[in-house]
Every structure is written in C-alpha cells, then in structure tokens.
Image (spheres, grey):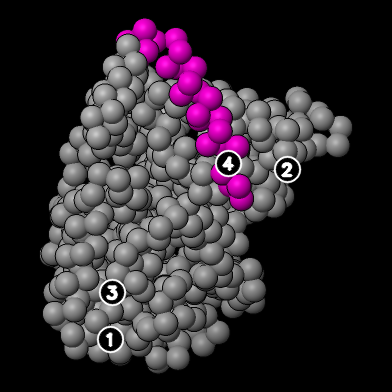
Amino acid sequence: MTKRSLSASESGIIKARKAFARKGWTQEYLAAEVEVSTRQPIWKFFSGRPVERHIFIDICFKLDLDWQEIAGFPPEASDTIADINGGEPHHQDLLSHPQISAPLTPPPSDLEALVQEMRDRLRVPLNLEYRNLTQLDTSQPVTVDDTYIPLQVLEQISSQRWLEVTDLQPTPIPNDRAASRLNLNPTYQNRIPALQLIGGDLTPNPTATPLRLMLLGKPGAGKTTFLQYLTLQCLRGDLCPTHIPLLLPIRDWVAAAQKNGDFDLINYISQKFKHLQITTDQITTILHSGRAFLLLDGLDEVSPSHISEIGQEIHVFSETYYQNPLVITCRLAADQYRFRGFTYVELADFDGDQIAAFVSKWFGAACKGNPETARHLAAQFMEKLDLPENAPMRELAGTPILLTLMVSVFFTKADFPKKRSKLYEAGLDILLSRWDEARGIQRHYSYRNLSLSHKIQLLSQIAAATLPLGSYFFEQNQIEAIIADYLAALSDIGNLENSRQESAAVLKAIEVQHGLLVERAKGIYSFSHLSFQEYFTARNIVQWPDSQMQREAIQELAAWLGDSRWREVFLLTAEMLRNADPLLQAMKLEIDTIAASSEFLQEFLAGLAAKCQGGSAAK
C-alpha cells in the first residue's frame, strides 16, 4: 500500500509560516505539540516537502489552519478524490490531478552547479551595487576596498553591564592636560576581530550551531560597510566560497512589503533578483540546502508599526531555514526585538592602529597616482592629531564617520581648522541630520517633532547642567528630568507630568537617531564624546539671545578659570562669541580675585615687580 503523505503548496507555506509566527513557537515546541520525536517533519512541512498525512493534519490543527487549504486542494477536487478513495485522498492521486499544486521541486542532484550558476549571475550586479560607499563631502567615488579597515567588536554589550557611575568616572590625573581628559570610550574591554565571529568556512553541518549574529553599533560605526565587505569577499571566493551572499537593506524590504502587502522574505528576495532570471524555486532550493549567506542591514530603520511583523518574519525564517548563516545589523538602543539563538556584539571604536591604517588608505585613495603625496599627507595628519592641544579632536577619530570628515577637511589645506568649533559643528550636522538624509532614511522614533534648533538647545542644556557638577556620566533619571523640564518649557500649557512620561522616549530617540547620548552601563549615560559635551556647554552660553543673560552665563563660566577641565569650554566659547571682550574681561576680573585672595601669589607678584623695576633701573 502506498504511504500516504501531504505537502504544503507555496501559498500554503506562506499562510502556515505567518500562523507559526503569530503563535511565537519554536519548531521544537511545535514538534512536541504534534508528538513527533524530532523537528524534521516540521522542517519538511514548512519547506513544502511531503509529510505523513496525519502529521500534516495535526500541524495544521495546532496552527489553527484548514489542512486542505494549506495543501492547496480546490474544494471540488478534494471532494472528488476523497469520494474515489473512500473519504481519504491519496497523495499519489493528488499529484496526478491537474488542478492541484505539486510539492516544491526537491533540490537538484547537482547542487554545486546551481550554486556556481547563481554566484556567476550575481557577481557583477552585486559588485556594482555594493562596492561604493556612501560619501558626504567627497566628489569622487570611494570604494570599500579603498578604505575598509578590519573592525573589532566588544565581548560585552556596554549597556548590559551592571556598573556604578564611580566605576566609569575615575579621578583625572592632575597637571597633565592631555592625560586629564577622560576617555568616554575606554578600550579596557576585550576586543575581538569581527571576522573571527564569521569564520571562513560556513559549509552546512547538521551537528554545528549555525551562525546567528546581531551586530550593534553607533551611527557611522561601520555596520553597513562591514556587510558590503562580507558580500564582496564572498563573491570573490575569499570568504564563504560555497555560499551565495544576499545583502538586503531591511528598509527596502519594508517598503516593498508596504507596496505589495506581503512581508514574506522569500517573496521579496525573489522579486529583487527576478530580473536576473533567478526563480523562486532556485532560491528556495538554496535556502533548503543552507547555501545562502543572509545579511540583513538596518533593523533600527524599521518603524515601530512594522517592527513586530518584521521581527516575527525573521524569527520564522531563521527557524525554518536554520542552516543558513545570518547576520543582522542594528544601532545600539534600537534592538528591542530580541531573537532567540543570536549572539549580540557591539562594534568597538577605532583604536590608534585602526585610525592610522584608515588615514593611510584614505589618503592613498584620494591621491591615486601620487603615492608620495599620500604618504606625506597621512604622516602630517597623524603628527598633528597626536599633538596635546588636539586631544579633543583625537577622541572623535575613533568614530569612522567622524574620522572620514576629519581627513576630508585636512585634505583641503593640509591642516585642521583654526576654529575647532567649526569641525564640531560639521560633525554634529552629519550625526543630527545629514547621514540619514544621504541614505534616504526617515526615523520614526518619538522625538516630540523637535526642530533641529530645539534638539541642539536640548543637548546644550543637558551638557550645561551636567558638566559643572563634574558629571561625565549620569543616571538615566537625572537626564530624563532635564529633558522633561525642557519639554515642559516648550509646551504651551507646561504640562510637566506629560513631559516626564515623554522624556524617556526622547532620550531613547537621541541615542538611536544620533548616537550623541550613549548608555555606557545599565541606566548610566554619557555624551558619545567629551568634546561634544564641552561644545554644547559652550554653545549654551553663546546661544542666549538676551545680552544680560549671556553676561551672567559668561561670569559663571569665568568662575571655572582655575579648573583645567574647563579649558576647552573657554576656548570654544571665545571662538563662537561674536565679541569675546566680555569673556576676556570676566576672566581678568576672576584672575584679579584669585590673586587678591592668595598670599602666595601676592608675594610672588610683588617679587616679580621688584625684579622688573630693578632691571629697568639698571638700564
């Protein structure tokens, strides 16, 4: 007697996967529900392969589905075949019926030939699509090969550490201007080469744990560039040569899903590569065989209204096609949807060696055909960056997107701007708006519809409220209180209670969208760079429209004249003021006050004056 079995149609698979996602189950859990010893029948069910009839029906029942609809039986055909077989349709009869969908084509005997054929078809178009980087202030295209530097990741996500403020903020070294600057991005955590997590051989192995990696990072940290690099290396055969790289910007997937009303990932992949004559069956075969290297870029770019649906689709996809390596990128603080079985890592800032390597490669690309000039400019850049007075700028160089800005500015005149505030303004312009705009990204996180000027004012108030307290790191409730006060002051009715409720969402939006405030440990925040905290503090003084209030702010600043930690704030304020005379006068009065109150200084100045008079008389 022929063994009876059923298989899901293509439309049935889509319905079943959506129902499975709504349940939120794993394949192991569903296997237990239908009382089978392994998840193999579950995998076969979701991949359209024949499954024993009673198991097929049980699976559909557990998922609240009509098994005949999932099998793709037209009602009249189902009834007819059931009648012929005494109420039990035979699988072989169903296959022969012209109106009934047959199971998906099984993998071809020559899988390697299919993999090679698809790699050949994708090599040129994917290389053209992903070899160039997004550039803001460069007229010539820059490729991944031109500037890519191997990235490193931190062993532990910073925001998941249980630390106190005192653990993060040690006492600065006195009388050392460069050393006394606190590094808000310490390198004491162990760092691992990012490629080490990927590995070179991802050949499907039933006994091995498949690659599941969530790569988190600040804006401009190099997440997308890393996926582009992996794609190009895979196409060249230098990485995962037996796989087909599929780099998919998640925002494009969502846009297509909104247009078509279909969030199914396989359907999106099929449509994306349809023009290359790659069929859905071929894609499905590759996925069943574990030969796709799936790279999903920008989970943070999904609107809150779609994140649950996208998250469930990724979850079901990774469970169904579990043999395929999968890497997802996301900004820090935007990873609310947690995926089971994934390793979460955080991209580390560039260290000194990475900065030097990037600078060398960037100038080499900018001075193509003139390597001597490139080496000279790179050496000049590093020499000036290492000067003690440029320590604030050196902090910014750890962020790839800001380092790119710095080298492009330096390239113009072989020097940094005389006014450091101009460089900071350009960097903030990138983080606050231009970086997302250049890539066509619209953020959807709650931000109270604040204008750009209001965002700058808010960040300035946060900086001005924390720096005088010596607070480089601050508790979440402290910063939320500052945000709430600002929002209440903006509101027509000044509803402080509503502002307090909204402040947490605004804090999260600042971190996700701009990366200017960063959660360094659980519930403990800081500015991304001390340089930006100093800049915003100075800007808070300069931006007062009322001259009297500005004079008062200047006098308050002058009171910090004897504290070396305020050196940059004084310099930045003097740069940005239209007329720095009031600041210089306030500093002079403060110096006189300090001198008048110090017996040591009085004696020193008296002795100095006597020597000067003696020297003058001798002449």
Q: x, y (%) of residue 226?
A: 29, 64
Residue at mark 3: 144
Q: Is residue 596 found inside the magenta-colored segment of the image?
A: yes
**What residue is drawn where x is 49% and y is 81%?**
271
Is residue 274 in view?
A: yes
Quadrant in which residue 380 is drawn: bottom left
**Whole-Å distance between the Cαs marked 2 and 3?**
46 Å
Query: Disc 4 on helix, strand or loop?
Result: helix
Q: In this view, does 146 lie to the left or right of 29?
A: left
Which residue type does callout 1 highlight? Arg
Which residue type does callout 3 highlight? Val
Q: What stretch is highlighted in magenta?
A: 577-602
Q: Is residue 600 left or right of residue 524?
A: left
Q: Are marks 4 and 1 in contact (CB under 8 Å)?
A: no
Q: Are marks 2 and 4 in contact (CB under 8 Å)?
A: no
Residue at mark 4: 581
**Whole-Å distance between the Cαs marked 3 and 4?**
48 Å
Q: Is residue 373 found inside the magenta-colored segment of the image?
A: no
Q: In which quarter of the image is the C terminus?
A: top left
Q: Residue 123 carries which label?
A: 1
**What residue is drawn where x is 33% and y is 78%?**
142
Query: Disc 2 on helix, strand or loop?
Result: loop
* Foreground of the two, 256 or 348: 348
